[in-house]
Amino acid sequence: MTDTATAAPTATIAVIGAGGKMGMRVSNNLVKTAHTVYYSENSPVGQERVTAAGRVITPTTEAIRDADVVILAVPDLALRAVSAEVVPQLKSGAVLLTLDPAAAYAGLLTRREDVIQAVTHPCHPSVFVERHTPEEYADTFGGIAAKQDAIAAVESDDPAVRELVETVVRAIFAPVVDVHWVTVKQLAQLEPTLVETIACMIGALLKESLDETVKIGIPEPAARSILLGHTQVALANTLKGDNPFSDACLIAMEYGREMIIKPDWKRVFEDSELDKNLARMLHLDHIER
């Protein structure tokens, strides 16, 4: 498929939580499409954001009445309550689309046999993505100018449903190159385990390391410059195989692994640890299925 949804059939879409951070992001892209879109927002602050953007607020009941796809752009902790309100009102065959897999994997979403659950999450623009314009360089999050991929899962074998979900995914995260299809559990193993538990944690560790370097008296601009440059080299060498590390660097890397990394760290990929992680994120005693 192409990286746009211009040739795809149009749909009626409702965005619940349209005034939140993600709600505004997906709405900013949906307004550029030919889809019929309704924007629902309960909080006064969020309503101000929606109206300031020139969009009309529609009550939730009205917004979802004829929707083919209902996007729940609300915080994870609100998804249980919001889905309990929304799902009973959806038309038969509608798709309930969430933007993070945690609640879906944990079984917190209200279900109906004739309502299809789907989950999606943006990959965000790769550090190696080709960029040409100032807008593309500035778009580190994605959904504005820089190309990105997206991950999606849908609980249906119907090709038409998958096409509908992909059409919406490409619209809300545009410009999108590829949509990668996985299961809900696999998406939960990617987000949070791979990218939040590991990658984002390492990003925070790099920042702490930079701060510690400055504390011992090294000028911050010098430390920041060498860290950012070497971070790109480290990613290119390990994830793309651009160049081999020197023998001395490999010795230093092994010392770092011994000092910083627990020998059993790969346990985070086990199902039991995923459940613990998501239960903590969702403020649950445990995950029940």
Image (cartoon, rainbow, N blue to C red):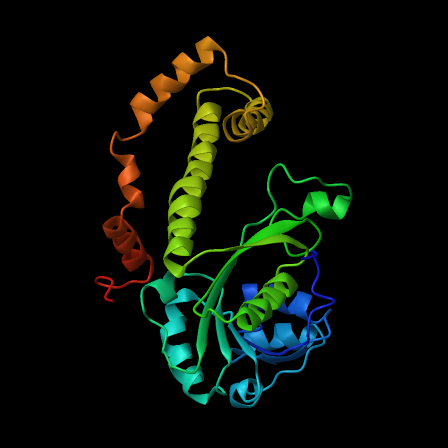
Between 29 and 94, the one nearer to me in the picture: 94
**Seen in the image, is 48 located left or right of residue 273?**
right
Q: Nearer the viewer, residue 58 or 154?
A: 154
Q: Is residue 114 left or right of 234 when viewed as pictured?
A: left
In the rendered picture of this protein, how many numbered marks are placed on residues? 0
Vertically, is 203 above or below 253? below
Query: Compared to 226, does 172 lie above or below?
Result: below
- Residue sitting nearer the eye, 205 or 87: 87
For residue 127, what is the image quadrant? top right
Which residue is drawn at the image coordinates 44% and 80% (left, top)?
Answer: 115
> Percent position (x, y) of residue 225?
60, 25
Note whether residue 24 is visible.
no
Residue at left 50%, top 61%?
Answer: 120
- Left or right, 87 with respect to 167, comes to left
Rendering coords of residue 214 (x, y %): 49, 25
Outermost residue to the right: 133
Residue 89 appears in the picture as rendered = yes
Q: Is residue 228 placed above or below 59 in the rendered structure?
A: above
Residue 174 point in image, percent of width and height = 66, 58
Specify the quadrant that holds the N terminus.
bottom right
The image quadrant of residue 212 is top left
Give the x, y percent position of residue 215. 45, 25
Along the line of sight, which residue is nearer the eye, 116 or 73? Answer: 116
Left or right, 267 with reference to 80:
left
Quadrant for the C terminus in the image? bottom left
